[in-house]
Image (tube, rainbow, N blue to C red):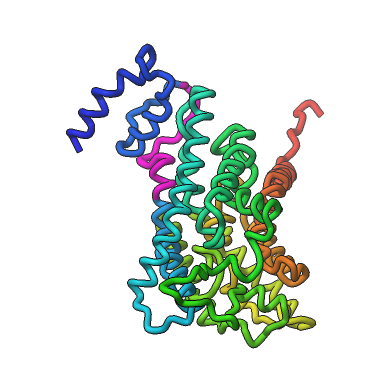
Amino acid sequence: MKPLRKLLNSLKPNFEKGGKLEKFYPAFDAFETFLFVPDHTTKSKGTHVRDAIDLKRTMILVVISLIPCLLFGMWNVGYQHYLALGIENVSHFDNFIFGAIKVLPLVVVSYGAGLTTEFIFAIIRKHTISEGFLVSGILIPLTMPIDVPLWMLAVATIFAVIIGKEVFGGTGMNILNPALTARAFLFFAYPTKMSGNEVWINTSTEKGQAVVDAYSGATPLGEAAAGHADKIPSIMESFIGAIPGSVGETSTIACLIGAAILLYTGIGSWRIMSSVFVGGYIMALLFNVFGLNTLMQITPLHHLALGGFAFGAIFMATDPVSATQTNTGKYIYGFLIGMFAILFRVFNPAYPEGMMLSILFMNVMAPLIDHYVVAANIKRRLKRVKPIQNPNE
């Protein structure tokens, strides 16, 4: 790494103040601090945190935790493709290669559009590149259907960076999860590309093979909303995730591997994760009592394994910026996300996957929850204060 360090040191004067490429210093600084831990020192006299890990390293660990979902998503894209074409005896390697060819362009476009937008804002505002998009850049394609047009993905990513983050002041200031902002934008702006049977599976013909007419590409929740109980996969099939859905959301196993990494490194909030699952379980259990439609009849554990519930609970709800900050607030925040997600599924047949709307709604409510938690703590402590007795009385 020493030759690379020397190369960067030789190039750095060109990007510093007075250099020929001074305007592009944010881009150089982002690249340099990505490769090497920065040697910045605190200059203010205020209180600050001393830690061996910086924000870039934190974001990279989150990206690493998403790799199981990405790899399984690539395999599942190929598996669902060949299954739709009626081609049997396809190897796991072929499934993965086909999926990688389809998924990697989504990742490249997401990072390309998002980082370009970040660079432009950093140059205009003359500040360093924020690290938050390292995670958003991989989350956005993982929450998309495989057949989303690349130009739509680029527009949604730019919208998420500008409207979901930069208008609030950048990383650490946004009130909404940027990745979910991108998905919500596409869902409401181009609903035909984000819903329906055909968008979840790539059914392009290959070597003259035609798509099987009787094959349905609907997600399990879509089948349940339509009342097709016989087409809903079992709990084990849903847990493994070899079913139609967004690129990285179908496998609960892959999500749990990512959760283990986040919890082991201390980055993910176990309070939010656990309370989301508890809230979803209790709400599904209550609906089981009534059982008025197919979605109400799905068992609580089955609900937690279907759709993007696990993915949202582990990677979206735990966003440290848009989530609640107090420990008590995290329990309330996560519990309500789980409850609302199942509630939206059951009572909105047109959009059975309610995790996105649930998290975005609670993102808006998070500051209010923290406010009341802090106010309650202050009130409780004031009650313990003993009045000072006046010795002259």
| Residue visible at 37% across and 26% down in the picture | 41
| Residue visible at 66% across and 73% down in the picture | 222
| Residue visible at 67% across and 81% down in the picture | 298
Quarter of the image for residue 74 reads: bottom left
Quarter of the image for residue 230 reads: bottom right
Quarter of the image for residue 299 reads: bottom right
Considering every residue shown, the one lying at the far front of the view is 208
Q: Is residue 164 visible?
A: yes
| Residue visible at 48% across and 76% down in the picture | 242
Is residue 46 a member of the stretch shown in magenta? Answer: yes
Residue segment shown in magenta: 44-60
The percent coordinates of residue 343 (x first, y second) are 74, 68
Image quadrant where one finds the N terminus: top left
Vertical arrangement, residue 35 with respect to residue 286, above or below? above
Considering every residue shown, the one lying at the far left of the view is 3
Q: Is residue 384 visible?
A: no
The percent coordinates of residue 329 (x first, y second) are 65, 52
* Camera-nearest residue between 169 and 202: 202
Is residue 151 a member of the stretch shown in magenta? Answer: no
Q: Is residue 35 left or right of residue 244?
A: left
The percent coordinates of residue 12 (x first, y second) are 30, 23
Would you say the magenta stretch is mainly helix, strand or loop? loop
Vertical arrangement, residue 41 with respect to residue 253, above or below? above
The percent coordinates of residue 102 (x first, y second) are 44, 61
